[in-house]
Image: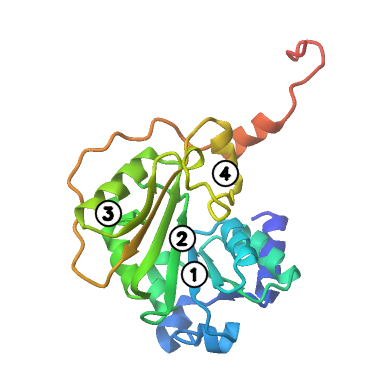
């Protein structure tokens, strides 16, 4: 592990807005803020909004700065990425931001029934071969139901045609109430201030000419959800790898034989 990551992990331990709770302690004692996030951490009764798979926390911090009347919690397992948003929010002394480092599969161990108002899912892995790992699949939606208020809102923002098609089919099959559904967000009438927040990788996809898809739907407590039985064309592109991104942003050599004009 690089020194930079070790430094970030050490800083994460000290940041007051970050919660990293070992699984052994969770299993033995439970999470002390479950059902008490507003009273014991935020100190208000404002709605709680989660960003699942928050990465660097661009949406968590961006939304929190725009809407101080809501409390935002970024959730991810990768602490080195989360450090960026957590440190930014801590330095800005943002009172309505927290970060939780855990697997999303364990989310109901950290929140009580009805404690969460909205969930944002921003650019997750589409998991084209593993339906039970899709963050908009029935397995995870049933999990979200355990912590959302009845009729709570789920937002999906994705570059993946596969995941968008799948989620759209699932929403329609189950008759879930939908506020917004667009396959090309930034060329629609829904490109507003909230949706205009762009993550690091989203901007790269836009620069590649890829459209961004967005669905906002409500998740009621009942009935049981069904999986759509449809064939979906796999995505025909891959996200940039770190090495490829570096190659793209490194200027070409201007020395002899380097390809410069």
Q: How many marks?
A: 4
CB contact under 8 Å: marks 4 and 1: no
215, above or below 92, in the image: above
Mark 2, mark 4: which one is toward the viewer? 2
9, above or below 137, in the image: below
Q: What residue did someone put label 1 on?
A: 49
Q: Residue at x 28, y 51 (%)?
A: 131
Dot placed on the residue nearer the N-terminal end, 2 or 1 = 1
Dot placed on the residue nearer the N-terminal end, 2 or 3 = 2
Relative to residue 251, is residue 135 drawn left or right?
left
Q: Residue at x 78, y 10 (%)?
A: 261
Q: What residue did someone put label 4 on?
A: 201
Q: What residue did someone put label 2 on?
A: 120
Dot placed on the residue nearer the N-terminal end, 4 or 1 = 1
Q: Which secondary structure lies at badge 2? A: strand
Q: Residue at x 41, y 41 (%)?
A: 160
Q: Residue 112 falls in which quadrant of the image?
A: bottom left
Mark 4, mark 3: which one is toward the viewer? 3
Q: Residue at x 59, y 86 (%)?
A: 43
Q: What residue did someone put label 3 on?
A: 171
């Amino acid at each position: 592990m690089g020194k930079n990551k070790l430094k970030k992990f050490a800083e994460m331990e000290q940041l007051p807005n970050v919660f990293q709770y070992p699984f052994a302690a969770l299993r033995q004692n439970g999470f002390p803020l479950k059902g008490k996030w507003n009273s014991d951490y935020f100190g208000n009764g404002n709605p709680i909004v989660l960003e699942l798979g928050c990465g660097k926390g661009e949406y968590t911090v961006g939304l929190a700065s725009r809407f101080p009347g809501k409390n935002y919690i970024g959730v991810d397992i990768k602490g080195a990425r989360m450090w960026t948003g957590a440190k930014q929010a801590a330095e800005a002394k943002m009172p309505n931001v927290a970060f939780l480092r855990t697997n999303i599969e364990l989310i109901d161990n950290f929140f009580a029934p009805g404690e969460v108002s909205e969930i944002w899912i921003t650019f997750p892995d589409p998991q084209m071969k593993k339906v039970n790992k899709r963050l908009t699949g029935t397995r995870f939606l049933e999990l979200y139901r355990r912590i959302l208020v009845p009729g709570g809102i789920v937002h999906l923002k994705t570059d993946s045609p596969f995941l968008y098609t799948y989620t759209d089919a699932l929403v329609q099959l189950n008759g879930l109430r939908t506020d917004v559904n667009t396959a090309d967000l930034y060329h629609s009438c829904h490109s507003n201030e909230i949706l205009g927040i762009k993550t690091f990788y989203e901007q790269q996809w836009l620069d590649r000419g890829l459209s961004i898809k967005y669905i906002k739907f409500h998740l009621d407590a009942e009935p049981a959800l069904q999986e759509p039985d449809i064939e979906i064309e796999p995505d025909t592109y891959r996200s940039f790898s770190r090495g490829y991104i570096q190659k793209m942003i490194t200027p070409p050599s201007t020395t002899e034989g380097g390809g410069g004009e």
